[in-house]
């Protein structure tokens, strides 16, 4: 299962769910093939298409929900009903829309004598007559995952409010709550549709026997499952920022490796101060490091945007790729200078041999 501690906060995290769902689609295709070849399971020839579509669609949708639940550390029972419901919804939608597409294609798009016989042939391997089936299968995956995330969000919010009310009546402190990102209709529906179309194109190219392709239907099926899951995981859901929290870490010799979290437990706005006052600061640094009493602060607002603020006349510099920002406090300004922070930004306090270096990094929220 996916582990948030193994997914660093870089641009590569956006491919974690894509690879996870891609493997699920590939395994679903392999499972169907194994039933036919090794399991000696037989069904009518016209059931090959819907069986494969339903299995791959359900596997990709279930993998998306299982991966999200694993990253959010949901319990086994919570995982089980979510995965089961997603698989059932995906199989239902894919079956209905697969039948609808072929009924519509047979009666409207390919009603002429030239096309009717080919459209009705279930063994015909042609993207012309199957592209709609792939699109409907991808749309089934997207709708199933979207419905589950809406149900999960509504039920989870209701349970959270009920628990908060009970704790309030009992005189207990409220449980810290981190708001979730709301599911996007466009990303799920359009992403599911694009995943199905990508699977169809990959299946067609690998099985068509063009100049650069072998025309092997075995590889075509494998590529179809992989492309379906990869595209679906890439477009519908990525590892959200809410699973990470900002930290300030010392990189200089004095207190090297010392770090403090910036975020509040309940997701509200927070500001952390750095300096060498012995009390009242969040990160204490010795005066020998040329850090003044109140040198810099790192803040996060309710929208999870991080900022650094210069609070002293001493040199305060933020460095990132191709950019240098001077946050030295200007007494003539009504407020200190500030700048947005991204993971990996360096903050330099002071200058010369006594310069102190800090780093702003994003780590999993569960990090302690």
Image: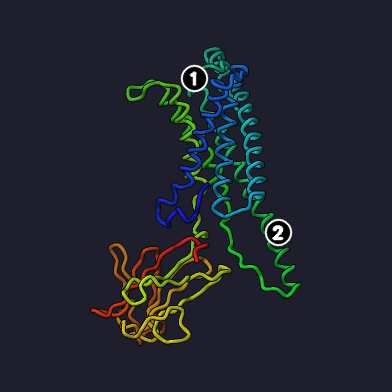
Instruction: In this rendered view, identify the residue nearer to me: 161 or 173.
Output: 173
Q: Residue at x 51, y 49 (%)?
A: 2
* Residue 197 seen in the figure: no
**Residue 229 x %, y %:** 50, 38
Q: Residue at x 45, y 53 (%)?
A: 6
What SS does tag 2 mark?
A: helix
Q: Residue at x 55, y 42 (%)?
A: 63
Q: Furthest residue to the left?
A: 352
Instruction: In this rendered view, identify the residue nearer to me: 27 or 294.
Output: 27
**Residue 30 x %, y %:** 51, 29
In which image quadrant can residue 348 be found?
Answer: bottom left
Q: CA distance from mark 2 to mark 1?
A: 49 Å
Q: Nearer the viewer, mark 2 or mark 1?
A: 2
* Residue 256 seen in the figure: yes
Relative to 252, say whether 54 is above or below: above
Q: Judge the density around disc 1: few (<14), some (14-19), many (≥20) Cα neighbours within 10 Å.
A: some
Relative to 215, say whether 2 is above or below: below
What mark, if any, has residue 125 been given in the picture?
A: 1
Q: Earlier in the sequence, mark 2 or mark 1?
A: 1
Q: How many marks?
A: 2
Relative to 289, say whether 103 is above or below: above
**Residue 356 x %, y %:** 31, 76
Residue on which disc 2 sits: 158
Q: Judge the density around disc 2: few (<14), some (14-19), many (≥20) Cα neighbours within 10 Å.
A: few
Relative to 216, say whether 5 is above or below: below
Evaluate if marks 2 and 1 touch, with contact meaning CB atoms under 8 Å apart.
no
In which image quadrant can residue 257 be found?
Answer: bottom left
């Amino acid at each position: 299962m996916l582990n948030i501690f193994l997914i660093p906060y870089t641009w590569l995290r956006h491919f974690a769910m894509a690879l996870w769902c891609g493997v699920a689609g590939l395994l679903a295709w392999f499972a169907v093939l194994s039933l036919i070849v090794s399991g000696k399971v037989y069904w009518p020839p016209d059931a090959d298409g819907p069986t494969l579509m339903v299995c791959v669609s359900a596997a990709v949708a279930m993998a998306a929900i299982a991966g999200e639940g694993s990253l959010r550390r949901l319990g086994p029972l919570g995982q089980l009903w979510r995965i089961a419901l997603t698989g059932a919804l995906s199989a239902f939608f894919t079956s209905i829309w697969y039948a609808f597409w072929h009924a519509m294609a047979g009666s409207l798009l390919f009603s002429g004598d030239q096309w009717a016989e080919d459209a009705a042939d279930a063994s015909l391997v042609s993207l012309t007559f199957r592209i709609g089936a792939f699109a409907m299968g991808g749309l089934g995956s997207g709708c199933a995952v979207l419905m589950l995330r809406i149900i999960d969000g509504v039920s989870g919010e209701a349970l959270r409010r009920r628990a908060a009310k009970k704790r309030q009546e009992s005189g207990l402190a409220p449980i810290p709550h981190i708001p979730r990102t709301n599911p996007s209709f466009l990303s799920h529906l359009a992403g599911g549709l694009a995943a199905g179309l990508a699977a169809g194109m990959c299946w067609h190219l690998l099985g068509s026997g063009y100049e650069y392709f072998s025309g092997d239907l075995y590889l075509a099926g494998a590529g179809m499952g992989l492309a379906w899951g990869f595209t679906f995981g890439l477009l519908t859901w990525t590892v959200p920022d809410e699973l990470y929290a900002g930290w300030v870490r010392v990189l200089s010799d004095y207190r090297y490796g010392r770090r403090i979290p910036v975020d509040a437990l309940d997701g509200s706005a927070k500001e952390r101060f750095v300096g060498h006052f012995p009390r009242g600061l969040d990160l204490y640094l010795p005066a020998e490091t040329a850090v003044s009493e109140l040198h810099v602060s790192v803040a996060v607002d309710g929208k999870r945007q991080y900022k650094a603020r210069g609070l002293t006349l001493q040199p305060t510099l933020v460095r990132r790729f191709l950019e240098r920002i001077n946050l030295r406090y200007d007494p003539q300004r009504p407020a200190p200078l500030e700048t947005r922070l991204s993971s990996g930004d360096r903050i330099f306090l002071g200058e010369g041999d006594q310069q102190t270096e800090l780093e702003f990094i994003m780590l999993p929220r569960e990090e302690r």
